[in-house]
Image: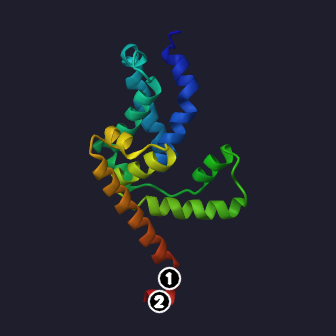
Amino acid sequence: MVVTFEQFAMARLPSLMRYAVVLTGDNDLAQDVVQEVLARAQVRWRRISEADSPEAYVRRMVLNEYLSWRRSWAVRHVHAVGERLVELDDARGAAHDHAQDVVEADALWNRLATLGRKQRAVLVLRYYEQLDDDAIADLLDCTPATVRSHASRALKTLRLSEHVNRIPAEEKL
């Protein structure tokens, strides 16, 4: 059965939006990225629909759009809003103490915003998309060693920023 573009877009839009929000850290930018990708996908739908996995193809388009130089200014201006990660958890039925979840998610968004685009993309692909290093390397057009390097540096940056945030104010002077 051939799936029309409209059927695909209606069925996969929520998933593509969640993916883009996790990548960008901003709902408005995620909407822009997904809108741009879907506009391009509609024009090429005949070729995309013949791919082994049209969804994987479109997800890669979302990743490439996020990594695109045209979006680099927006990545530097990500505003941390912890509600977004909490909403993703709520959709999966995992929320406990909403206030604490918002505080923790906001802190995570702040730390993720300090990462470079490729480092952030590697973490999202590894921990949100559950992809292995080879699959991430294929998506980012690099070697698995480069993926591991990006992940290692990103995690080190996140650990350091978490450590700095835990130091009492009088020790920071």
Q: Quadrant of residue 160?
A: bottom left
Q: Find residue 135 and report its horizontal and vertical position in percent.
A: 38, 39
Q: Amino acid at mark 2?
A: Glu
Identify the secondary structure beneath mark 2.
helix
Q: Is residue 66 something that shows in the picture?
A: no
Residue 51 appears left or right of 10: left
Q: Residue furthest top?
A: 1
Q: Find residue 70 and report its horizontal and vertical position in percent.
A: 30, 42
What residue is drawn where x is 72% and y is 61%? 97
What residue is drawn where x is 61% and y is 64%? 103
Is 23 located above or below residue 17 in the figure? below
Q: Amino acid at mark 1?
A: Ile
Identify the secondary structure beneath mark 1.
loop
Q: Label 2 to label 1, Cα distance in Å?
A: 6 Å
Q: Find residue 124 and report its horizontal and vertical position in percent.
A: 45, 48
Is 101 located above or below residue 137 in the figure? below
Crowd rating for badge 2 (residues with CA inside 10 Å; few <14, some 14–19, many 20+): few
Is 170 located above or below residue 60 in the figure? below
Crowd rating for badge 1 (residues with CA inside 10 Å; few <14, some 14–19, many 20+): few
What is the basis of the colouring in this image? rainbow
Identify residue for label 1: 167
The numbered mark at residue 171 is: 2
Q: Are marks 2 and 1 in contact (CB under 8 Å)?
A: yes
Split into 4 quadrants, where in the image is the C terminus? Answer: bottom left
